[in-house]
Structure formats: C-alpha cells, structure tokens
Amino acid sequence: MSHFIVIGAGQAGQSIVTTLRGQGFEGEIILIGEEPVPPYQRPPLSKAYLLGEMELDRLFLRPESYYADENITLRMGTKVTGIDPVAKTVSLGDEVLSYDKLALTTGSAPRLLPASIGGALGGVYTMRTLADADAIEPEFREGASVLIVGGGYIGLEAAAVAAKKGLKVTLVEMADRILQRVASVETSDYFRALHQAHGVDLREGVGLVRLTGDTRVKAAELTDGTTLDVDFVIVGVGITPGTELAELAGLTLENGIKTDLYGATSNPDIFAAGDCASFPHDGAQMRLESVGNAIDQGAVVAKNMLGQAVTYMPKPWFWSDQYDVKLQIAGLFNGHDRVVIRETEDTHSHWYYKDGQLIAIDAMNDPRGYMVAKRLIESGKTADPDKVADPATDLKELMRG
C-alpha cells in the first residue's frame, strides 16, 4: 500500500488530500500541520471572523469527522523537523515516517517588524493565523487607537474592521500608493476614497521609524515627522514563502520552492503547492498568493502524485471584503497598458487590457461583470473596450463578442 504524506494543513494541503480520495486513492494519507486545529479558511480571519460575523466552526474546511470517515490521518500541532529525500522519510522530532510521495504545502509567514524598531513590543500583531485573530480581537475596543503598517489587502481589511468597530484608525503605506504591488492606480484611488470616507487617516509615502513603549507599544514615530499615540499595531507588510524544510531537503528554490508544470520539485517524489510553491509562467517562476491558486494547484498536484501527468494552468482569482464593498479579481493585471472603467448606478469595475486583449478585472460590487470578464479571460477572448465603458451595454453582449 502506498504512503502519501502532506506537510502543511492549509487550503492547498486540504485540496490535495480531498482530491486524492476523490480520485480513488486507497493508500495511507497523513496530513501534518503545525497549528492545533484542522484545516480552516484564512481569508475570513481579517474580515467576517474578526467582525464577529462568522463562528469558529464555519471556518473549518471540513468537519473533523470527515478525516476519520475518509481514513485521513490528521497530525495537528506537529512540527516537522526534517526530510530525508534519499531514505524517503519525514522526521517529527524522534519519530520517523516513511513516504512514497510527499507534498509540501508549507504556506507562508508574515514579515515581522525588526525588534530594533519595536517589533517585539506587546500589542504588535500580524494577521495570518487563527491564533493571530483570536489574540487581536480583544484589542478592538471602541475608541481605541490602532496603527496599521502596510496598505495591502490584509492591512486594508483590518482597517475596515477597525473603523466599523469605532476605533481611531491610522494606516501608513511606505510606497507612493496603497495596493501598488497588486492593483492599478484606478483601484488604489477607489479604495483610498472608500477608507477616507469611513474616517481612516490614510497616509501614503509614509513609513514607520520606530515603535516606543516599555514592554507594550505606546507610540509610533513616522517618517512624516509625526508621533502617534497608539493602543496597538497591526503589521501587514507582506509574506515570505515557507521554504525552510525544502531547503533542508536540498530542493531547488526559486521564488519559493521551484516546481515544474506538474507541481513536482527537483526531487520527482516530492511535490509542492500553494503560497510556498513557484511554477513556470511566461518564462519565469511565478508564485500566486491566493486561495484559488492553493485549491487549483493542490488538486493538480494530487493527480500528479497518482501519475496522471496533468499540467497546471493557473486561473487567478481573488476577493476582498471592505465595509459594504466586495472586491472580486480575475486574471493578472501585470503589464496592462489600458484600464477601462465601467460604472453603473450600483456597480464599479476596472477592466485591464494589454495590446487590446482583456487580461484582468477588479470588480467592486459587480458580480455579473466579474463573472463575464472571468469567463472571457479564461477562454482567451476579449471585450470591446468602448462597449465595456458604456453602462448601457448589456453584459451578455460582451459575451457574444
């Protein structure tokens, strides 16, 4: 009987083990995770869960009984200390497990502020895990002052929750604009206006000099020369892929754990998927930090662990909830040379073009526009920009070309 081990109990690991069973694999499956809880959704942590609108049991991807029913061994709260790719073993301290195929879905970790500028003070948080969300939640007291460092989606979502709960919110972004790495100027403008309308003090081109306090943060000195009194701080300055085990195992790293189109690493019996893994795309190794990628890539990896030789063709999608706005993204905006804005009374969307081809969309409260654009992008079709810009154009007409 074959023995498959998956290290990392996030969305990608969950996708692999459920796909393996769905494909009829009857061998042993062990899913190992460092956190003491079964696989769960991360996106709601900085949205509905932090707002108190989602209960804990709704976070879990499957009820715990599922794993017993499917004969999947869960090893939660367990740290993997090493991989021997020659002996094909995984070490859990003194315990050694053998595998026939191994998958690394070790995710990513948030970047931390250096201790030298106050990053180790109490009251300084990141938002990545369930434990992070549970630790932060008591800080969300009406009237409290929070500094959010970083104007990406995590920072903006945390700002929205804090503002809705009546906190005094200051957000600083060192780059020229929020969302600079992931969205167009137009989308940045939209969300800047949204947050300012909700009372967020949003400062772009402003960084953090240091946090001060004895054992707990009390104030923040900023590069614009101001000092803020703060009750707590949330840091959202990006993530780094979880490559430590892969490096110890001697696997090739390139923008994460390097894989081929089948999700295989430089060792043919070890695969990788999710935030930690990079795959070939447009002549380079790309990583996609999204739930959609973790699910889709995990499913492909599972099939290839079974020898099916399925190539991974990414279909990027992402979402963010801020206040009463649901942002839905499809495609990749990189390299766009034109942004077409489509507005109706209730919807707003940005359609990205490159050399006349539709490549991505940012849709704000526009689910129909999002679905139409997503189908066009995934099928390699496009939409007439002039028709997109005309709010009178029926979206069905865009599908007809």
Image: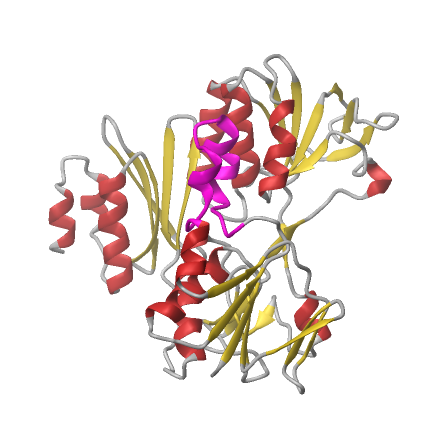
Q: Position of residue 214 (x, y in %)?
A: 88, 26
In the displayed orientation, state which residue is furthest to the bottom: 86
* Residue drawn where x is 63% and y is 38% of the image: 132
The verdict on residue 260 being magenta is no
Magenta span covers which residues? 38-63
Q: Is residue 247 visible?
A: yes
Report if residue 46 lies within the magenta region.
yes
Query: How many marks can you see?
Result: 0
Residue 173 placed where, x, y %?
63, 36
Q: Who's the residue at 59% across and 14% down the image?
A: 142
Q: Position of residue 136 (x, y in %)?
A: 63, 30
In the image, farthest residue toward the top: 143
Vertical arrangement, residue 236 with respect to residue 385, above or below: above
- Report which quarter residue 369 is drawn in: top left
Query: As displayed, is residue 81 above or below residue 156?
Result: below
Classify the position of the C terminus by image quarter.
bottom left
Residue 203 seen by the camera: no
Q: Position of residue 361 (x, y in %)?
A: 34, 48
User: Which residue is at 27% across, 32% downward?
Assistant: 347
Lateral position of residue 329 relative to residue 165, left or right: left
